């Protein structure tokens, strides 16, 4: 079984990775981080292509550090994971990666937004659930005491 776990630096993403490693210890797990600087569009429109390239480079460097943390988290569960970094819109990139790589399932963290903030900010998890070509498990992190 191949499982895709989209990751960022949030507690829900860590909970999703722990869920995947704990519940599917023999699966091939891929941690995917999408670099999507919101400023890219505005800077590109203003002709600041070099600044966009610098932002993407910084985002990719930060992603490698983040993915190292997820490799350690998986290793704590005796699971080796693959890691991938791509640049693009987060939800669309996750769905495209899932289709192109032929994963069997997506395990994604939920930020637990409700009401107005969910509507105005959108939800990557919700978009992935609605449009995924494969089953999706949404993991809520444990509540803080």
Image (tube, rainbow, N blue to C red):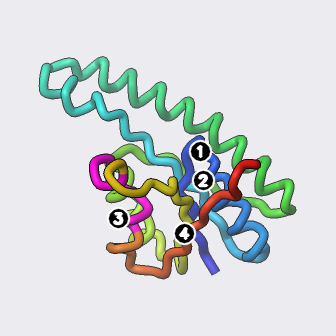
In the depicted structure, whether residue 35 falls above or below residue 57: below
Q: Residues within 10 Å of mark 3 (few under 14, many from 20)?
A: some
Provide the residue designation for mark 4: 138
Could you tell me residue 100's position as x and y percent?
A: 40, 69
Could you tell me residue 4's position as x and y percent?
A: 56, 66
Mark 3 or mark 4: which comes first in sequence? 3
Does the residue at mark 1 contact the one at mark 4 (Cβ under 8 Å)?
Answer: no
Provide the residue designation for mark 3: 127
What stretch of residues is rendered in magenta?
118-128
Q: Say which quarter of the image contains residue 53.
A: top left
Mark 4 or mark 2: which comes first in sequence? 2
Q: Name the foreground residue: 129 vs 89.
A: 129
Could you tell me residue 144's position as x and y percent?
A: 72, 49
**Magenta includes 119?**
yes
Quadrant of the frame with the N terminus: bottom right
Q: Say which quarter of the image contains residue 20.
A: bottom right
Q: Is residue 65 left or right of residue 124?
A: right
Q: Is residue 135 left or right of residue 26?
A: left
In the depicted structure, whether residue 80 falls above or below residue 102: above
Does the residue at mark 2 contact the one at mark 1 (Cβ under 8 Å)?
Answer: yes
Residue at 27% in and 31% down: 40
């Amino acid at each position: 079984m191949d499982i895709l776990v989209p990751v960022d630096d949030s507690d829900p993403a860590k909970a999703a990775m722990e869920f995947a490693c704990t519940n599917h210890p023999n699966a091939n797990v891929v941690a995917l981080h999408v670099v999507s600087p919101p400023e890219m569009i505005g800077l590109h429109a203003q002709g600041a292509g070099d600044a966009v390239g610098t932002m993407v480079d910084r985002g990719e460097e930060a992603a490698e550090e983040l993915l190292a943390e997820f490799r350690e988290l998986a290793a704590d569960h005796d699971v080796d994971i693959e890691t991938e970094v791509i640049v693009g819109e987060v939800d669309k990139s996750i769905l495209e990666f899932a289709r192109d790589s032929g994963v069997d399932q997506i395990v994604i963290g939920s930020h637990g937004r409700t009401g107005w903030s969910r509507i105005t900010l959108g939800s990557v998890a919700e978009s992935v659930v609605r449009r995924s070509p494969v089953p999706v498990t949404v993991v809520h992190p444990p509540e803080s005491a």
